[in-house]
Amino acid sequence: MDQFTLNLLVVGASFALYVGLAIWARAGSTSEFYAANRGVNPVVNGMATAADWMSAASFISMAGLIAFVGYDNSTYLMGWTGGYVLLALLLAPYLRKFGRFTVPDFIGDRFYSQTARIVAVICLLVMSITYVIGQMAGAGVAFSRFLEVSSSTGLFIASGVVFVYAVLGGMKGITYTQVAQYCVLIIAYTIPAIFISLQLTGNFLPQLGLFGTDLVSGEPLLARLDQVLTELGFREYTTHNGSTFNMVLFTMSLMIGTAGLPHVIIRFFTVPKVSDARASAGWALVFIALLYTVAPAVGAMARLNIINTIYPNGVSGEPLSYDARPDWMHSWENTGLLGFEDKNGDGLIQYYNDANPPAIAAENGWAGNEMVNFNRDILVLANPEIAGLPPFVIALIAAGGLAAALSTAAGLLLAISSAVSHDLVKSVINPNISERGELLAARLSMAAAIAVATYLGLNPPGFAAQVVALAFGLAASSLFPAIMMGIFSKSMNSSGAIVGMLVGIGSTLLYIFTYLGWFFIPGTNMLPNNADNWLFGIAPASFGTVGAILNFIAAYIVMKVTKPAPTEIQELVESIRVPRGAGAAQSH
């Protein structure tokens, strides 16, 4: 059986499972659509949350970014895992006790204001649509290779699949679909990693293999990687080279952005009791750790494998001939995500840092780096092929990458549809709308969000993980401060929360659009996106922390010059914070 047919069988079987589960658990009421009727077991919810959490950015893109940058991009690991702990300890149990369906629902009721609810909906839509762009782009990359179509066609296929099972199932269907997707993605991620770790180091566990010995050279794996990279003019893999200030801001932006993610927060509304919210958060951390502890090993080993492929006789030996390139290179070239240019006409592939050319480049007449395009989002998907693993492993990672992208896309689309139908249509525009009408509005808004994300996903403002990092910055600057103040500041009033959210998301969007283009449209940026033009050296993806600080400051200034929150609201906040009556959700 050829690779293409095997890919179709494995991916097709996984999709049939997802759609079948969505139809089996189809939502028949708004409670089932928004919160799975609040009857999900904590372990099941933990697994679904992990799948919701581990998006295309985690599965497809994160290891690629770590592989090509090294230590500096470990910020993705630190920020995302640290932020989840923050979410589990500080927010999830309190929000579940409040007993609402959505984040805007909480903000609207806590700050006793329809205006606050509308502003929260706007913040949620901006953040979630930015996030979905990254998921759709990642799914498009996966489809393009394994169905052997262009990345644009892959994106349209991904949109169609998400539309079917997300629009049909709602939260009830998505929960069980995400459990299946977690099982697929974690098996798909770890099996190739185990094979590659055994090949390179002899260690069964990739986590140990990362710190093991390279079997070919007899040196520690990371020391060997540092050596070959510096011989090719690149920076050492294990050394911090960027701005520490920017690194801290970026990590914090990912952390507090994580804690403000509406599509993850709404998962804690699906469990029966407040204590179950904390338990499901604990289980989710366990399930997430299974992938996140493997990712650094995948990145380092893949980078070494790429260099070994291009320089089969060592860096000082003759590079790989273009005509002799392996099948995986040829396949990815067809997608447009990998490209070579023979700059010196010798028919060989020279891969090195031509911005800092090593001595070997001049000695051998190299005319520049000839791997002119290597989309970092392909690295994990190409990893089994690079390592020469069996065809079934290649098909498995195809299914895993798609599971990761589509599970998060579904969760985000549910957050978007809930915000529009429940928080905007039912709570503000038409309070008397029927349950059937509300479900229709939810599904129509989800379909519209898919269309917008697909259009923007055709020209994303970066690799999947980079786009997602922008979404985290938007969540950090807008929703996280409002939720924190809503839980831990009894006197915070509606005026302060509204102004804070507007200042936070407004300043962050302005900063991002200045460097990445208005609404991410190429060519509309006002300044070049490089460190020389960034304000105080702060990258656009790191500005979420600054936006959050501005949010808090603006909120407290406005609160000081306006009336404090009413007494009944302050008593409500007190009741949320104290674990009285934690056995069941409180409805206010």
Image (spheres, grey):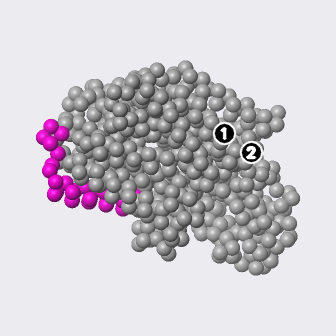
Query: Residue 463, how many percent across, how many down?
Result: 59, 55
Q: Quadrant of the N terminus?
A: top right
Q: Which residue is mark 1?
A: 157
Q: Which residues are magenta?
A: 544-569
Residue 550 among magenta residues: yes
Q: Which residue is mark 2?
A: 149
Q: Earlier in the sequence, mark 1 or mark 2?
A: 2
Foreground pick, 508 / 210: 508
Quadrant of res 315? bottom right
Quadrant of res 31? top left
Instruction: Identify the element where label 1 is drawn.
Output: helix
Q: Is residue 208 above or below residue 284?
A: below
Foreground pick, 126 / 354: 126
Query: Residue 389, how many percent across, how many down?
Result: 74, 43
Look at the numbered discs 1 and 2 and tell me whether their residues touch, using CB distance below 8 Å: yes
**Point 48% across, 40% down: residue:** 412
Foreground pick, 198 / 24: 24
Going by the numbered disc 2, the residue's amino acid type is Val
**Point 82% across, 56% down: residue:** 325
**Point 20% across, 39% down: residue:** 573
Going by the numbered disc 1, the residue's amino acid type is Ile
**Point 74% across, 41% down: residue:** 147
Kindly report the secondary structure that dominates the magenta region of the rendered protein: helix
